[in-house]
Amino acid sequence: MGNLTAIEIKAFVPAKDFQLSKKFYQDLGFTVSWSSDDLAYICNGNTSFLLQKFPQGSENFMMHLLVQDVDAWWSHIQERDIVAKYGAMIEPVSDKPWGLRDFAISDPSSVLWRIGQNIDSKN
């Protein structure tokens, strides 16, 4: 059998309003490393995804971002007033019984993000 080692996997995240979604992710703390008229490479540290212009939107699309400090992400979102600026849905930070402390936020295309950290890694 040949070498089946995977290097990475990236999701194509749909964006109804491509420019607005790019701005949302930059405000959220990501960097647009490359962009064309309908595709953008979005990064934060060693994590990344592809933002795709997709006017139809997508039903029930969810992403999970595991971070070192979920409370810092929560504070950043509050300080940048992202909920009001983008009409985002947000759930407060809470500890989950499966060992994560997380919160949920939606992007301008209703993509739901769960941003969290492992509870045992909290300082």
Image (cartoon, helix red, strand yellow):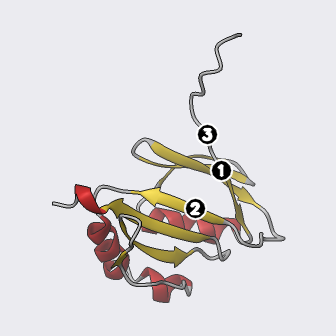
Residue 4, quarter of the rendered image: top right
Where is 36 relative to 118, above or below? above
Residue 108, quarter of the rendered image: bottom right
The tally of labels here is 3
Q: Does label 2 or label 3 sit earlier along the sequence?
A: 3
Q: Residue furthest top?
A: 1
In depth, the one of 79 and 10 nearer the eye is: 10
What number is the disc on residue 63? Answer: 2
Secondary structure at badge 2 equals strand
Q: Residue furthest left?
A: 123
Q: Residue at x 69, y 67 (%)?
A: 61
Contact, CB < 8 Å: mark 2 with mark 3? no
Q: x, y (%) of residue 122? A: 21, 61
- Residue at mark 3: 9
Contact, CB < 8 Å: mark 1 with mark 2? yes
Q: Is residue 51 left or right of residue 73?
A: right
Locate the C terminus by quadrant.
Answer: bottom left
- Residue at mark 1: 11
Locate the N terminus by quadrant.
Answer: top right
Q: Is residue 115 left or right of residue 7?
A: left
Q: Distance from label 3 to label 1 (Cα)?
A: 7 Å
Q: Residue at x 34, y 61 (%)?
A: 117
Residue 80, quarter of the rendered image: bottom left
The kind of residue on which mark 2 rests is Met
